[in-house]
Image (cartoon, helix red, strand yellow):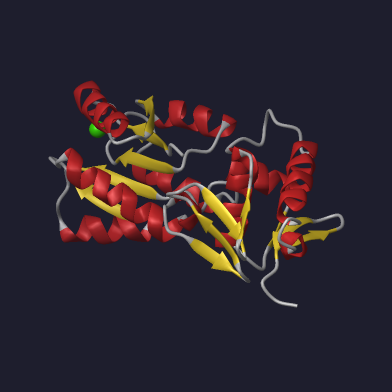
Amino acid sequence: MANSVLIVEDEPPILEVIAVNLEHAGYVPWRTDSVAQAQDLIEKALPDVVLLDWMLPGESGMAFARRLRADRRTKSIPIIMLTARAGEQDKVAGLEWGADDYVTKPFSPKELIARIKAVLRRRAPELTDDAVEISGLRLDPAAHGVTGGKRTIELGPTEFRLLHFFMTHPDRIYTRAQLLDEVWGDHVFIEERTVDVHIRRLRQALSESGHERLIETVRGRGYGLRTRG
Ligand code: CA
């Protein structure tokens, strides 16, 4: 699954170098050169990671990071700050204001990609390739496979992502709007009942091994995956 990376960088050559390297590494770069442009994109769909330049014309990257953290919808998106400032003081400020990591220019594309992988692993386990297992249900992102006990479970791509999200965020209930944001990356153009359709399909597929009971419905609230009881 290709992760989207929103890049906010006002220097065109740097923006291009980052975008091209991300593409080569299998990511989908979203190119923007200002906070205003980035904001427009984010209102339509959520990226998996934000690479944010500190010094930007108009609103600064740091102020934008702070706003992303304050908003319920965007607060869990990993943010990596890009900056020419190497001072220890600034690093502390960056992390305190909500960035997850900090890369000082000039940086090697290799290093940047390693940092992206690391923040994804820390903040969004459903976006990494680590296998997860709950009550005999096992999902392996690298092999794109799911097994329940000894049975192979066939899932469509959306059900796979949905199950991956639930298995990495168990014992919590998510509203349909939250699931659209987290799993589809889009809560604006997709109808909420789409979630119900995919939950139904997921349950049906999991009933192959009796694991459908892990998926919990809380009336009027949403869905989750239960590891106990
Ligand atoms: Ca800049």
Task: Identify the residue at the far right of this view.
Answer: 219
Position in image of residue 117 (x %, y %): 33, 50
User: In the picture shown, does residue 23 fall above or below 206?
Assistant: above
Q: Is residue 145 left or right of residue 104?
A: right
| Residue 41, percent from left and from top | 51, 28
In front of the other: 18 or 39: 18
Outermost front residue: 150
134 to 39, vertically: above or below: below
Tell me if I can see residue 217 in this picture: yes
Q: Position of residue 73 (x, y in %)?
A: 59, 47
Q: Residue at x 60, y 44 (%)?
A: 183
Which residue occupies 46% across, 49% down? Answer: 127
Where does the C terminus fall, quadrant-wise?
A: bottom right
Residue at 64% of width from left, 44% of height from top?
155
Is residue 191 rendered to the left or right of residue 130? Answer: right
Image quadrant, ligand 1: top left
Whether residue 99 is visible, yes or no, is no
When asked about the image quadrant of residue 8, the answer is: top left
- Reply above or below: 134 against 59: below
In the figure, is residue 51 to the left or right of 69? left
